[in-house]
């Protein structure tokens, strides 16, 4: 099970992958990324991740790089990694150029970097018993729909959660609108109906969010995509996070208060099951 890196067409041990210090991803956070995971030797939702990567690159006005090239490189690295349960990190930056806020010439080659490693699974007891979270003010920029590597606000919030002794933080706008987790989307349930933040510039269009909404459509579970506030979160019967490795992760305590009965709810269980069925 070799942990490997891919850098601009070459595959090597991760420690040997070197990017020049004037990479714009390093200087400006001028890079986009994806994270795709496999189950039983097959990458899950690769095409949806490629579509989102294309969206990020388009919105950042990166020079075009064909999705066929990217798909081929991902599949090649995945094959060489020989891991049934792999996580592939993909990062593409605007390239290497003398530090200048203005974009470099359009013929500056993009830097295309990836790693393949075994997935670091969430602890089974967190899945079984549910997790605790805190809310934090959303300090992120105004284009959270673009998956850029500018994740300092997410790192700060996650660290704040860990130091508070809980699993994760939920971003809430200054006006009280509940957005998402530090690396996951959020759903709440009230009286059997799910609510989640609508797709706009304030959240990441999660692939797992999309799959879960699809499962809900199949199972006749109503999902409302609309803004909801802190008060509605506090009064929810259930809350859960969704994400590639997070899958469907129930939250049973938020800001020290129990969510609903304070135990994992039926919808979270049912949807985690529905997700695993899709994966099979
Ligand atoms: C801020 C944020 N929201 C949501 C997600 C969930 O997205 P996905 O389901 O595609 O993993 C992520 C994943 O990295 C994220 O970073």
Image: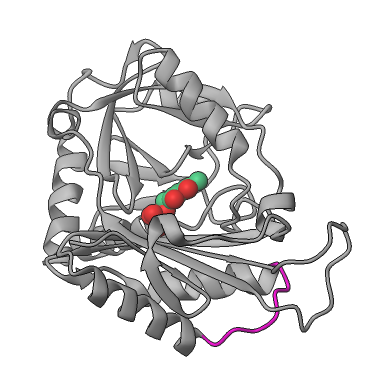
Residue 229 makes an appearance in the image: no
Picture coordinates of residue 218, whole percent (x, y):
21, 65
Picture coordinates of residue 76, whole percent (x, y):
32, 80
Residue 263 makes an appearance in the image: yes
- Left or right? Give the position of 199 relative to 10: right
Is 65 situated above or below 254?
A: below
- Residue at (34, 25) in percent of width and height: 167
- Residue at (21, 40) in percent of width and height: 268
Q: Quadrant of residue 88?
A: bottom left
Classified by dominant secondary structure, the portion drawn in magenta counts as loop
- Left or right? Give the position of 225 relative to 166: right
- Residue at (56, 49) in percent of width and height: 203
Q: Quadrant of residue 112?
A: bottom right
Q: How many marks?
A: 0
Q: Is residue 138 magenta?
A: no
Picture coordinates of residue 251, whole percent (x, y):
29, 28
Q: Nearer the viewer, residue 111 or 140?
A: 111
- Residue at (25, 75) in percent of width and height: 80
Is 59 situated above or below 20?
A: below
- Left or right? Give the position of 56 relative to 214: right
Q: How is the image coloured?
A: one colour
Q: Quadrant of residue 229?
A: top right
Q: Nearer the viewer, residue 89 or 268?
A: 89
Q: Nearer the viewer, residue 179 or 34?
A: 34
- Left or right? Give the position of 68 relative to 265: right
Is 203 situated above or below 77?
A: above
Q: Check the picture and name the quadrant holding the N terminus.
A: bottom left
Q: Which residues are magenta?
A: 60-66
């Amino acid at each position: 099970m070799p942990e490997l890196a891919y850098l601009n067409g070459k595959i090597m041990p991760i420690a040997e992958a070197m990017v020049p210090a004037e990479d714009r991803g390093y200087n400006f956070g001028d890079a986009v990324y994806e994270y795709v995971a496999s189950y039983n030797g097959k990458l899950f939702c690769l095409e949806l991740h490629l579509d989102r990567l294309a969206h990020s690159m388009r919105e950042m006005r990166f020079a075009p790089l064909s999705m066929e090239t990217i798909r081929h490189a991902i599949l090649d690295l995945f094959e060489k990694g020989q891991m049934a349960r792999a996580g592939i990190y993909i990062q593409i930056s605007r390239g290497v150029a003398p530090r200048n806020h203005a974009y470099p010439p359009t013929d500056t080659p993009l830097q295309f970097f990836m790693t393949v490693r075994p997935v670091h699974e969430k602890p089974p007891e967190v899945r079984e018993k549910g997790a605790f979270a805190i809310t934090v003010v959303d300090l992120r920029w105004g284009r959270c729909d673009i998956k850029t590597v500018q994740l300092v606000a997410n790192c700060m919030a996650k660290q704040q959660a860990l130091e508070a002794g809980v699993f994760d933080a939920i971003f809430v706008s200054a006006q009280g609108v509940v957005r998402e987790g530090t690396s996951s989307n959020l759903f709440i349930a009230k009286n059997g109906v799910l609510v989640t933040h609508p797709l706009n510039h304030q959240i990441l269009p999660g692939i797992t969010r999309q799959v879960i909404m699809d499962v809900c459509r199949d199972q006749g579970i109503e999902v409302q995509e609309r803004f909801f506030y802190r008060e509605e979160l506090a009064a929810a019967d259930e809350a859960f996070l969704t994400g590639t490795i997070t899958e469907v992760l129930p939250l049973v305590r938020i800001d020290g208060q129990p969510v609903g009965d304070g135990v994992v709810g039926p919808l979270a269980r049912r949807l985690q099951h529905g997700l695993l069925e899709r994966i099979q």
